[in-house]
Amino acid sequence: MKVVLFITSFLFFRSQCAKILGVFPAPGYSQFILGEVLMTELAKSGHQVTVISPYRPKDEPPNYKTILTKEVIEGTSDVISLWDLESQNLLNNIMASYVFGNVITEKTLQNKEVQELLQPNEHFDLVIVEHFFDDALKGFAMHFKAPLVLFSSMGSTEWNRECMGAPMLPTINAVIYTHYTNRMRFFQRIRNLYGAIFDYLYRHYVFYPVQRKYMAQYFPSSMDFDKVLYNASLMLLNSHVTTSENILLPYNIIEIGGFHVITKPLDKEIQTFLDGATDGAILFSLGSNLHSSDLSQDTRNAIFQVFAKLKQKILWKFETDLPDKPKNLFISKWFKQRDILAHPNIKLFITHGGLLSTEEAIFNGVPMVGIPVFADQRINMARAKSNGVASVVSFSKLSEETLFEAVNETLNNPSYRNNAKRLSSMIKDRPIEPLELAMYWLEYTMRHSGMTFKPSSLYLHWFEMYMVDIACFILFNGLVVLLVIFGLMRICKSKKSDKQKKQ
Ligand SMILES: *[C@@H]1O[C@H](CO)[C@@H](O)[C@H](O)[C@H]1NC(C)=O
Ligand SMILES: *[C@@H]1O[C@H](CO)[C@@H](O)[C@H](O)[C@H]1NC(C)=O
């Protein structure tokens, strides 16, 4: 009896404690935070986790191992100039992501420890890959014969939808580099269609060949890139209807946006600063990829002029020293943004509009002034604006006047705060906490060995999917029928005229 008990409890333990590989290769620290929250939660529930990432957690749990790929940060630092993307056209913005992604992928795969991991006798029960222009990394799942789960720090994007079998519908899905919402006007839909087609063509004919080469070059086992590409069992999206609109999603995509917003107590210094902000406080941060210290002296002065007109205290994420800073200003290289936004005295968030920042602001009911620059920042801010929780200043038009007008309007018109509070109560009102939901689906994928019900779209060619074959068939048949009718009419006519001639 005891032996049976021992064996069953041992078996139970085995199925409870799995070996999970997380690949979060992106050089952005905020993206790492998302991976860290997910993987730490898996470690907390008893799994043995290994994470490939350019960063490691501050306090790593004992069953959490990091394979540090620092070279990704150095390798990508001057691949593209993020500030310049704001003024560039849609096509350049699309291409930049793929160029960036290729560097991330290669640097990650070249890492010595990563290569050692790929040696025989290593084993994983589940592989989670951050889907970020790095499709060759899906090879980890195939290599370890483990189910593949994709995680995206963005929402429902062109490439996320395609690889999970969600149809491409540029009429209702704005390309994420645009400043549209999903309700587009006629000419916006035309530009959006051309962006979506360009993205598809560039991805398939320029980007995938490079990724295919990396997969062949860096994985010891040979695998079929085209099969691995579409073989994810599940995709977790960092989005929610309050930040990313009501989108059409297939069964194998789960939205967990807001899962990372876990508030911890503030550091003493900042707590005191915020408690003393009797007129309220403003947080200003351009995120982890853009540095405020890179702003030109003119822009910096314009921002100072705006601050000088405000009675609120200001926290600015600024990466160098600022000797001549105004008295109401607190600067720091890094802020625990999630915790600061939760302070009741925070009245406004001036942000670059990254998705994490947007979610954290909406979660805490804080209105925003968006200064979007690249990637999905413009669309995030367009959506926040259409929800009445943000004003937007375009970076190229940033001046004392435009910034002050936006800040004053958003601070003093109560509708922004009311809308933010409304969305905040909605993002918190969920049947299950998003992090718990993510854990459920990850365990589900392991319990059922990655068995999912793939949408039938994944079994069709694009011309079948978009009914081009059916349209051609109908057109052809229609043409045949028309020709037959036309032919018959001609015969009748000639017979008639024959008769007339005879008479
Ligand atoms: C696709 O995923 C399933 C389930 O995890 C797995 O059994 C299969 O080997 C994978 N195929 C490829 C080509 O990766
Ligand atoms: C600031 O905004 C308020 C509310 O919209 C408006 O009444 C006021 O005139 C604005 N102040 C300035 C200086 O623009």
Image (cartoon, rainbow, N blue to C red):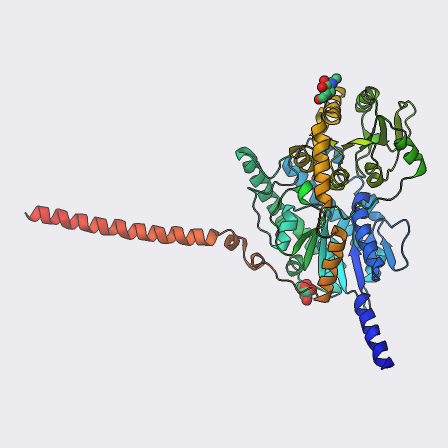
Pinpoint residue 148: horizontal percent, then vertical percent. Answer: 71, 60
Pinpoint residue 245: horizontal percent, then vertical percent. Answer: 64, 42
Q: Quadrant of ligand 1?
A: bottom right
441 and 195: which is toward the camera = 441
Which residue lies at the image location 79% right of the left edge and 34% below the top edge?
286
Q: Residue furthest right?
A: 268
- Numbered marks: total: 0
Task: Describe residue 220's horizontal placement relative to residue 465 as left or right.
Answer: right
Res 86 visible? no
Task: Describe residue 180's horizontal placement relative to residue 474 as left or right.
Answer: right
Quadrant location of residue 358? top right
Which residue lies at the image location 78% right of the left edge and 46% below the top edge?
31
Quadrant location of residue 113? bottom right
309 and 195: which is toward the camera = 309
85 and 420: which is toward the camera = 420
Q: Residue furthest left?
A: 503
In the rendered image, the vertical position of residue 294 relative to residue 212, given as above or below: above
Pinpoint residue 411: horizontal percent, then vertical percent. Answer: 75, 26
In the rendered image, the vertical position of residue 20 relative to residue 36, given as above or below: below
Pinpoint residue 26: horizontal percent, then vertical percent. Answer: 78, 47
In the rendered image, the vertical position of residue 154 relative to residue 250, given as above or below: above
Res 42 visible? yes
Which residue lies at the image location 69% right of the left edge and 30% below the top edge?
87
In the rendered image, the vertical position of residue 235 relative to residue 293, given as above or below: below
Task: Describe residue 397's horizontal placement relative to residue 503 as left or right.
Answer: right
Quadrant location of residue 264? top right
- Considering the image in quadrants, where does the N terminus appear? bottom right
Q: Residue furthest bottom?
A: 1
